[in-house]
Amino acid sequence: MADSPSHDQELLRQLAKGNEAAFRALYERYQGPIFRFALHMSGNSATAEEVTQEVFMLLIGNPKRYQPEKGAVAGYMFGMARNLTRRSIQRRHLDVPIGDYDENGAGSCPALASNLDILGELSQSELLEMLRKAVLSLPEPYREAVVLCDLEELSYDRAAEVLECSEGTVASRLHRGRAILKAKLSCHKCAK
């Protein structure tokens, strides 16, 4: 996503004229990030593939639906992926347990994350699996902020565009999501 938003807008204009090279350029630039976003949000690779395909089908089907005054092409595409992922999760009734936590992340584990060195005792694959499960168990608003800002490395303003909220709200959700993740990962250490 290194190219400028104006370059993306030009690619979208060319796509509207039937330019296949413009579609390929957009696809190559955003297929991976859109897939990863949907995967992190749903926890299901089939859902991520479907969402990614549907985003690009919608883009091809009606490229003029994009409104530049509402934000960047990337934000528009992530917004579509967000909505499609939500619908897919609702359809499948994917219910990810969140353990002993309430929606604010309060848990029963007394240990503080700052006192633990979980990285030292876990293999890379164990850590990744534990992190994946912890991210999936976050309440949706926090999960979206963590996935967009930490995993997809979007700036607060671009994440705010996708989530249709203020940058301050993104920062707040990200802070809270990180705190919940830290607590969840610490409690995993407690259980060992």
Image (cartoon, rainbow, N blue to C red):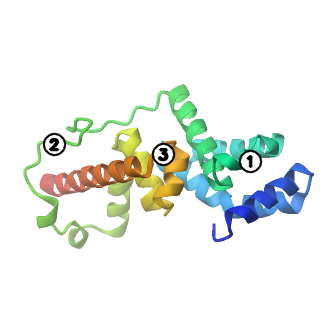
Quadrant housing the C terminus: bottom left
Q: Residue at x 47, y 43 (%)?
A: 165
Q: Position of residue 184 (x, y in %)?
A: 23, 51
Which numbered circle lies on residue 134? none
Quadrant housing the N terminus: bottom right
Q: Secondary structure at mark 2?
A: loop
Q: Amino acid at mark 2?
A: Gly
- Give the quadrant of residue 83: top right
The residue that disc 3 covers is 41
Q: Eyeballing the image, is 106 above or below 129?
A: above
Furthest-left residue in view? 110
Q: Secondary structure at mark 1?
A: helix
Q: Secondary structure at mark 3?
A: helix
Relative horizontal placement of residue 9, taking residue 125 as reference (left or right): right
Q: Position of residue 154 (x, y in %)?
A: 51, 60
The residue that disc 2 covers is 107
Name the residue nearer the viewer: 115 or 155.
155
Q: CA distance from mark 3 to mark 1?
A: 18 Å
The residue that disc 1 covers is 56
Furthest-front residue in view? 69
- Give the quadrant of residue 33: bottom right
